[in-house]
Image (spheres, rainbow, N blue to C red):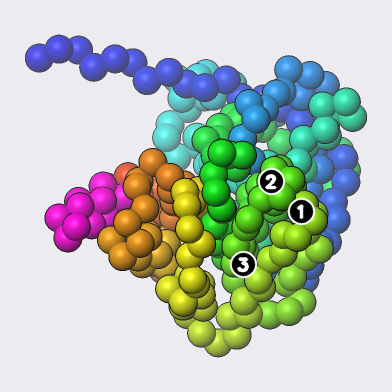
Amino acid sequence: MAERPQRRTPKAQGAQVLRTEQITPHMVRVVLGGEGLADFALAGFTDHYIKLCFAPEGADYAHPFDMAAIREEYPRELWPTTRTYTVRSWDPVARELAVDFVVHGDEGLAGPWAARARPGDQVTFLGPGGGYVPEASADWHLLVGDESALPAIAAALEHMPEGALVHAFVEVPDPSEEQKLVAPEGVSVTWLHRGGRPVGEALVAAVGGLEFPEGDVQAFVHGEAGFVKEIRRHLRLERGIPLGRLSISGYWRLGKNDDAWRAVKREWNEQVEREQESAA
């Protein structure tokens, strides 16, 4: 049997909290800075993300974490836990990195951390990664997501080409969670209020009822995996959009915590693709 290649441990970077801002009742922006960001750079995508690293209780290592050393010297239960978040904005001159967090009380790991974050707090992260940016060559753009995808949709709107034709749908719990977004003249967002309905139900209905413009579409659909699957099926099978024109991913899965979802996400995506290809 051939020896499996060793998995490379990505280098972690350190930063510190500069300030926080309550964007909406359930959205907190944490702005990071410090000398640890001296070499930080983005590659031009609007869905750039970083993986924040959280040390478990009882760990005695300090920021920034040396991930390779930790995996070598500590048992797995003391390894940091990672959570993936979109880069809302990056100012290389001021060296300020903004990340928005959905916060629901003490639920989860990163949300409560963001709610408690104070200037001077240290953080370790991996990245950035990314892969989507609005293309000027597209005839029109479709942006769809729940509040977890709002930071990436907001960044995409800010980078839309002048004169772009855009249909953007964002689902949030209620009107208090709407944000003022920057976009080229003529581009607006359709806000959908969930209320007591299942997550994504309003988005599925909005996309299904949309009269698609003529021409090549570039679509970005992200959020809870259940509605993402439904919209992906609709775009691929009923609208005939090639897979290469779609940026689609389940950021999270109802009923699963982040670790459980990440453990099955790749297999889930492959299964969805097989099902839809066989149905085509």
Question: How far is disc 2 from disc 1 in space, using C-alphas?
Answer: 7 Å
Q: Which residue is mark 2?
A: 160
Q: Position of residue 122 (x, y in %)?
A: 76, 35
Q: Which residue is mark 1?
A: 183
Report the side of 193 relative to 82 (left or right): right
Q: Residue 262: within the magenta? A: no
In the rendered structure, which amino acid carries the disc numbered 1? Ala
- At 87% across and 40% down in the image, what residue appears? 18
Disc 1 residue crowd, few under 14, some 14–19, many 20+, Cα 10 Å: many
Quadrant in the picture for residue 3: top left
Callout 3: SS: strand
Callout 1: SS: loop
The magenta segment: 267-280
Q: Residue 276: within the magenta? A: yes
Q: Relative to 72, say whether 55 is above or below.
A: below
Q: Which mark is residue 170?
A: 3
Number of marks in the image?
3
In the rendered structure, which amino acid carries the disc numbered 2? Met
